[in-house]
Image: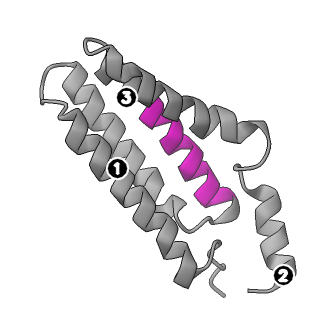
């Protein structure tokens, strides 16, 4: 990937500036802190995962960040699962859900090593 192409993609990446705090840092903090609030945890997790999903899906569209193609849908599925748990339709299984999400997110970041940080547009 050319340097100019990468610089253009980095400029559009939402992981720069204030957006990283609003789209990922704050939701991650809420995920961790809500562990002490068992009754409302599923609702907080639903909102946090939905916000992170929106950020990743927007980032995939804006700058074609490689891991966002995995994490965007992953966070959306986690938000849906959390909503279903909040409504009492499924068990939350917070430990399993959090470990699965963390594991898949780490694998998505590792995938950027061989695949590159940003996907190139097809000709």
Proximity of marks 1 and 2: CB atoms separated by less than 8 Å: no
The residue sitting at 63% across, 72% down in the picture is: 117
Q: How far is the residue under mark 1 from the one under mark 3?
A: 13 Å
- The residue labelled by disc 1 is 101
Q: Quadrant of residue 77?
A: top left
Checking the image for residue 46, the label placed there is 3
Task: Please state the horizontal and vertical placement of residue 4, each as a whole percent of the image.
Answer: 87, 78
Task: Please report the bounds of the magenta region as a residue range.
Answer: 46-62
Image: 115 above or below 68: below
Of 21 and 83, nearer the camera is: 21
Q: How far is the residue under mark 2 from the one under mark 3?
A: 38 Å
Which secondary structure, mark 3?
A: helix
- The residue labelled by disc 2 is 3
The residue sitting at 68% across, 41% down in the picture is: 20
- Quarter of the picture containing the C terminus is bottom right
Which secondary structure, mark 2?
A: helix
Image: 116 above or below 76: below
């Amino acid at each position: 990937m050319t340097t100019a192409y990468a610089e253009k993609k980095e400029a559009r990446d939402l992981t720069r500036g204030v957006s990283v705090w609003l789209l990922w840092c704050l939701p991650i903090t809420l995920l961790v802190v809500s562990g002490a609030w068992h009754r409302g945890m599923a609702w907080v997790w639903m909102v946090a995962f939905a916000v992170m999903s929106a950020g990743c899906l927007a980032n995939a569209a804006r700058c074609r960040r490689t891991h966002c193609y995995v994490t965007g849908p992953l966070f959306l599925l986690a938000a849906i699962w959390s909503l279903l748990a909040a409504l009492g339709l499924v068990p939350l299984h917070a430990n399993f859900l959090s470990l699965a999400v963390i594991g898949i997110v780490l694998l998505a970041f590792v995938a950027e090593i061989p695949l590159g940080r940003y996907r190139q547009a097809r000709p």
